[in-house]
Image (cartoon, grey):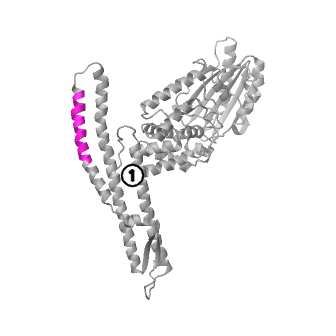
Amino acid sequence: MDFEALHSANFKLLDDRVTDWTSMLTKLKELEKDAREGLRGRALKANWAGYNATVSREFIGKTAGEFADAQTQATSIRDITSDTRDELKTQQRLLREAIERGRGKHLTVTAKGGGFTVEENPDSKDSTTSQKDVDELRNELQRILDKATEIDSTAATSLKALVDLTDHGFSDAVYKDRDSAAAAVKKADRLAALAKKDPEDLTVKEFDELNAGLKEYANDDLFAERFATSLKAKGTLEFWSKLNEPSTNAELYRARREQLDDLQQNLSLTLANATQSDTAAMAEWKRQIVDLGDKPVGRGAGFPFGVQVMSNLMRWGDYDDQFLNDYGNKLMDTERRLTHNGQTVAWQRMGFDPDLNRTGSDNGPAADTMESEGLRESLCPRKKQQACEGARFMGTSRFKEKNKAEIGFWAITYRDEKAADNAFDPYWDWHKNGLGKPKSLDLGGVGEQRQAALGISNYQSDKRAVAQMRVGAVIMWVSVDASGQTGIDEALVKDLARVFATRADEAQNGKTPKAALGA
C-alpha cells in the first residue's frame, strides 16, 4: 500500500458499504423467514402428487435455502469488510502518530512516489537527532505500511474467493472477520506446499502439520478450494500414490504409519468439500481428475491408474453430484476397457505396490488371468520381463491386523514347468532386492525350487520375510510383515511356506487338501 494512500485515506466509502450491507442483512433476514415459513412451509404441507410431489417440491426447497445462504454470505462479506476497515483505520492512526513523534525529534516525513523519505529538518537548531532516530522512524513506518498492505491484500483475496465459491446462487461459508478468512487461505497455501514436496523429503513434523491442518480445516470452504486447486489434480493423485509407495520414506513410514488412515480420511473430507466449489480453478481440477482416471499416475508414469488412487480418496465426505456422475462414468469406462469388459482385472495390489487404502479393508482373495496389461505391469519385474513369459493366471489373498502384522499369499501359474523354472530366479532377485540386509532362511525340502529371506522393509525399516517356492508350473510366495517390536517368527514363515506349497501340490494332483499349520 502506498504511503500517501494510507496517510490520506478517507474511509467514508467503506463506512457506507458496511452500513449498506447491514441494511441488506435486515432485508435478507426477513426474506429468509418468508421463504422458510411461507414458500417452503407451504410446499411441504401441500397435497401434491406426481411431478409436483417430487421435482417441484425439491426445487422450492432449494430455492428457499438460497435465501438462507444469501444471508450467510452477506453476513460474511459485511463482517470481513467491517473488520478490514477497522484494521486499516488503526494502521492509519499508528502512521500519523509515528509521524508526529518524529516531528518532536525534528524529523520530516515526505511522500515520494509510492513510498516516503525520512530526513532531519534542516531548519532545526541545536538538534540532538541521530541517524539512529532516522532509521528507527523509517523502519516503524515501513512496518505499518507492510501490515496495512497485508490487511488490504488478504481482504481482497478472501472476499474474491468467498464470492467465487459459487457460480450460481450463494455460499454458506461463514467468516466472522478478515483474520479468519485470511488464515484459511494462508493455511491452505502452506499445506499445499507441503503436499507438493516429494514424499521422500517429507519430515515427520511436516506430516503432522499436514495431517492436523487438514483435520482442522477440512470443512472450511475457502481452505478446501484453495488447497485442492493449489495442489492441482495431478499433484493430488501423485501425492497419495507416492506417499504410500514402498521404499519412499522409511523414517516417515516407521514413525507415522498408524496415522496414514487418519490422513486418508482428512484428505478425503477436504477434497469432497472442495468439489462443492464452483470456481473456474476447481472446475478444471474436477475435469482433470476425470481425465486422469485411465492414465498411470505412479512414479515414472507407472501404475496405479488415476481412478485407483482417487477412489481411495472418496471414502469420506459429500462430493459434488455432477462430479460423482462424471467420475463414475469414467471409472466404468476405464474398468470395462482395461479388464476387457470384466474378463480380467486392471490392477491388483501385490507385495511392493502402494497400499492406497489405509483402512485395512478390501484385501480379500482375488484371481485373474495374466492377460491384463495393468496386472502384468504391476507383477512383472520391469527389467526382467521373461519372468512373465508363459504366465497364465494369478491369485492372491492377504490377512492383516491393523498396525501389527500382515501376511500375504500369491501365486502365478505358467503354461508349463519350463516357463515357471525360467521365471523363478528373475522373480527371486526382484523380491530379494526389496529387502534391506536380507538373511537367508532354510525352507527345507519345500517344493521343487525354494528361496526365502528375512530382512528389513525398505519403506518402513520394520521386519519382512519373503518365501518363494515352485511346485510344478506354479510359483508362489508368502510374505510376512511386522513391526520391529513385534518381530517375525522364522518357524512360522517356514510353516506357512510348507502349507502353501503342499496345498498347491495337492491341488495339481487332485488330492484332498490335508496340509495344515503345525502338522
Q: Which quarter of the figure is the C terminus placed in?
A: top right
Q: Main secondary structure of the magenta part?
A: helix
Residue at the far bottom in the pictured view: 126
User: Residue 310's spot in the image, x, y percent?
Assistant: 53, 33
Quick check: can you spot residue 450? no
Q: Residue at x 52, y 41 (%)?
A: 259
Q: Magenta residues?
A: 24-43
Give percent across and percent down for residue 68: 29, 39
Quarter of the image with the N terminus is bottom left
Tell me the residue that label 1 is attached to: 180
Residue 353 point in image, percent of width and height: 62, 33
Q: Which amino acid does label 1 sit on?
A: Ser
Q: Would you say residue 506 is visible in this rendering?
A: yes
Residue 469 x/y as whole percent: 72, 25
Q: Determine whether, in the image, residue 400 is placed left or right of residue 123.
A: right
35 or 341: nearer the eye?
35
Extreme top residue here?
510
Q: Nearer the viewer, residue 81 or 14?
A: 14
Q: Left or right: 263 with respect to 507?
A: left
Q: Does the magenta stretch include residue 62?
A: no
